[in-house]
Amino acid sequence: MGPKILWVLLPLAAYAALLALAWRGKAPSRLAVNIHSSLLLMAYLLATAGLGLFWVANQQLPVFDWHYLFGYATLLLVSLHLFFNLPTAWRWLRQRRVAAAPAPKPAPAGSGVAWRGVARLAGAAGALVLAFALGAHWGSRGIQSAPDASHASHASASAGGAASAAIATVLRYHAASSSSRSGVLLRAPAVDWGSQPGPFKVYPTAPHIALPRAVADHAGVRSLAAMLRGSAPAVPMRALDLAAVGQLLHLTAGVTARRGGVALRAAPSSGALFPAELYLLVRRVDGVQPGLYHFDPDRHRLAWLGALPAGLPAIDADLLMVVSAVFQRTGYKYRDRAYRYVAADLGHLLENARLAGHYVHARVALLEQFDEAALEALFDLDGSQEGVIAAAAFSAGPAPPPAVPIIRPRSAESAASARVAALGITGQVHTATSLAGLQASGSGGTTLDSAGRSEEGLVSLPAGDAAEADLARTILQRRSQRRFSDQPVELQQLASILADMAQAPLLSGALHADLVVNRVTGLKPGVYRYRPARHALQPVQLGDFAAQARSAALDQDVIGDAAVVLILSTDSAKALGSGARGYRMAFLEAGLMGERWLLAAVARGLGACPVGAFYDEEAAALVNAQKGRWVLHFAALGRAQD
């Protein structure tokens, strides 16, 4: 923050120095100071307004630092301006008589100057209107543009016209939602997202069931690290009951703190907007009647939505958690990039759900294939403003739950048309990544970036130690840390966090993990590729890349000041090899990995923060990514600043 303040104040200091030289020690007149402060005020007002209109309004949030610093400087100049104009205002207020209005004078020759002034004002207003119209026009064109020719092979290689069209939609969406320094001036959102909706969905007339909350240091459970690295609970599984469901939901998406009027949750969310809503299909839970429920995190209770419909096929799971997103909660702020944020946010939530399932001794399966339209109809969701994104099954039985559609009471086509009409390109990508856009099942069957890499120059990492921290305590105390000290992270800590993060893929095997190392003891600064199969780092380029990382992440201090920056990316060809659905699964997988990174950091006394805002091309260049590799996610790591 310090350097930014200096840059903002520098023009004022330079202007003052120039005036001091011009006046050469003479005291300036009140009128001169008034005029010069007015000129500076206009410049700073334009800078503040420009940043607000073109950057902050388009959700380039790190520029908000510049925006409010320029705003403070503007307030300083306003105060100075008002000070020198106060006597005039005071004299006007003290007038006790009203002078007779003077007779109008005949217009002198050359009065056309006034008309020219009016014409200039009208021309300026017209220019602003024209600029807005052009921005909206080009923005609409950008969003509807054809996919990049470099990715055309994806669509042409896909079998079936529907699958090909779905992949083309994904490519078009990714290009349209990619951030660049010039994009904000060339593109406007094609959808009017409206104002911010409420943070909670409620069913006020429904019967409710109060839930118990999770308590730290729950007896008899394994450490956080053991659950992070395990795929199933090692302790005997137990039948789910009301207490277990309450703990499960609290650790998945419950309210864990309230600050500044915002209810913070167990899983992080971009901009603290929390688009997720949780619905439960209960079959076998002790103390809970089978049926359909909605989770209210604000009051930590379940709302009864109705009995299970007749004719539902048998599902070998005790509890099905359906995760939807209220798109407007994120879209009103992040616009056409919202779907990326939503998918990553829900990935964080799903990792919490997986860990919380182990915490209550249940078997957990994250579903890849499920019928979004069927589940939306089952819980009476409109499928446009609120759409189903993910599902997880919990069971005390040994058999994994099947990944099959539940029911299909309405056509996918009607749901798709509703999404597109309401959300534009966001609705299109949601439809494309739904069940209809799936070409083949499976996540690729490979571990994270495990093959095809050179062995040259590998830096072997020490074996990761297990953080003996209680899962509930870690989740409940986790908060995103945005201020880091200049102290380094120990290599052993980094190795342990990476070991916790890198397990077999759950939804997508197409991800890569790169690190921008700034301050790690025993490790040279630079960019590294993590090789989980060898638990080693592959140098990509050595040197100081902190400033480049900060720049790629929209000049965010949280990235520039971090000791380590995690950058997750995906091979687009591999991600879309199983159909357009792979795009959503890649972002969900990035969220899963990012949450493991966060929790592993908190368990070791470090601070971490996920970041979804970055310039796509600059981020790809930072990790030396080949064409066709998309950066999905940033996450900072460091020692928290006191």
Image (cartoon, rainbow, N blue to C red):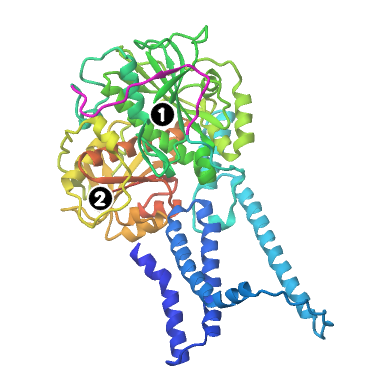
The dominant secondary structure in magenta is: loop
Task: Indicate the secondary structure of the residue bearing disc 1.
Answer: loop
Provide residue 435's location: percent of width, then percent of height.
51, 25
- Could you tell which of marks 1 and 2 lies nearer the N-terminus? 1
Please state which of residues 162 and 639 is positioned toward the viewer in this rendering. Answer: 639
Q: Which residues are magenta?
A: 200-219
Res 502 visible = no
Inspect the image, locate mark 1, and give the three-letter code of the amino acid beneath it. Answer: Pro
Asked which quadrant contains residue 260, the reply is top left
Answer few, some or many: residues within 10 Å of disc 2's Cα (few below 14, many 20 plus, some between 14 and 19): some
**Residue picked out by circle 2:** 640
**Residue picked out by circle 1:** 297
Spatial distance from mark 1 to mark 2, Cα to Cα? 29 Å
Report the residue at 49% width, 70% height from top: 79
Q: In this picture, is 285 found above or below 442?
A: above
Q: In this picture, is 24 found above or below 458?
A: below
